[in-house]
Image (cartoon, helix red, strand yellow):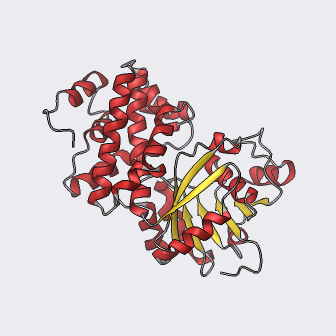
Amino acid sequence: MSHARPAHAAVLSAGSWGTAAAKILADAGTGVTLHARRPEIADAINTTRCNPAYFPDVKLPDAVTATTDLAAAMSGADYLVLSIPAQSLRANLTAWAPHIPDNVVIVSLMKGIEQGTGKRASEVIAETTGVAKERMAVLSGPNLAREIVSEHPAAATIACPDQDMARRFQTACRTTYFRPYTSTDVIGCELGGVLKNVTALAVGIASGMNLGQDAIGVLVARGLAEAIRLATALGADPITLTGLAGLGDLVATCSSPLSRNRTFGSHLGTGSTVAQAAAATRQTTEGVKSADAVLTLAHAHGIEIPITETVAAVLRGTLTLDKATPALMERPAKSEH
């Protein structure tokens, strides 16, 4: 990777988190090309400096340029930052693979598990692109896009097997309002981001049902326990799950009305159907898509994750809300740890 010029990142795509990531990178001094699927979004970003679909009130830095031309977006990029729905990752990357520059570092912002395979985003990226794991990183943390574009203080973990690579990307995205830390625990960072979405759905349901703050505290604590159990079984360091990509993200996602997963859950808790909740939430809600995949992954490793199991059953329609709470509360008594 050349250091004779400023680093350049291609950000795919121009959704809420992709737009926020583009702003962070540009504010950190990194050049950014933002790929938008819709020409009107790319044109608006280039002419008005705003993304009208997500943040019409936020001015993007001049260092962000938008395009609908995928090959042009990736050309000369040092970093390929992926912010697309986890379930469309494989198909998109398979199509994009011929355009991916040699020696590019791929950074995943995805927080989902692929349905059908139970694979994490980094595993799908490796399979579809052939990029070595030393050139793949994951960024995860308590990062609500609306707060970040408003430049509220935030932090995240950048996990990459190559610590030097993680440090380079840390420099490429560090700003006065965004503080990235580094890690080598890709599995822990990815699973922390995935599991907190499912727990946030449970918290939203409990909130919508007016079950009280004690119930929410229980779900957050036991949701974290589920994340630690599963991540550790898959080779993660349990300490990662107590950090930004685990507990930090869990708290933000479970407590904020800006959280899609919590909002989706609260619609369910007040009596909406899954279809109605999806229509009301509008944007991709990764926890809904990932709950069954996480459950399958846990069962394959003999790990009990009762909160996830309950949420998945509610989403499938095989468990009604009036039976969901008893299903958790009437489980056999046990030691906490």
Q: Quadrant of the C terminus?
A: top left
> Residue 193, image x and y in percent?
45, 50
> Residue 155, image x and y in percent?
58, 50
On the rendered structure, is 213 left or right of 39? Answer: left
On the rendered structure, is 68 left or right of 127? Answer: right
Q: Is residue 199 above or below residue 187?
A: above
Residue at left offset 66%, top offset 73%? 78
Residue at left offset 61%, top offset 46%? 154
Whether residue 333 is visible: yes
In the image as oriented, which residue stretches furthest toward the right?
Answer: 47
> Residue 261, image x and y in percent?
47, 37
Whether residue 114 is visible: no
Q: Looking at the rendering, which quadrant does residue 9 occupy?
A: bottom right
> Residue 290, image x and y in percent?
39, 48
Residue at left offset 29%, top offset 48%? 295
Q: Is residue 100 above or below residue 238?
A: below
Q: Is residue 254 above or below residue 190?
A: above
- Residue situated in front as seen by the camera: 156 or 34: 156
Q: Looking at the rendering, which quadrant does residue 121 occupy?
A: bottom left
On the rendered structure, is 12 left or right of 51? Answer: left
Residue at left offset 64%, top offset 49%? 15
On the rendered structure, is 80 left or right of 299? Answer: right
- Residue situated in front as seen by the camera: 329 or 292: 329
Count of numbered circles on the image? 0
Q: Quadrant of the N terminus?
A: bottom right
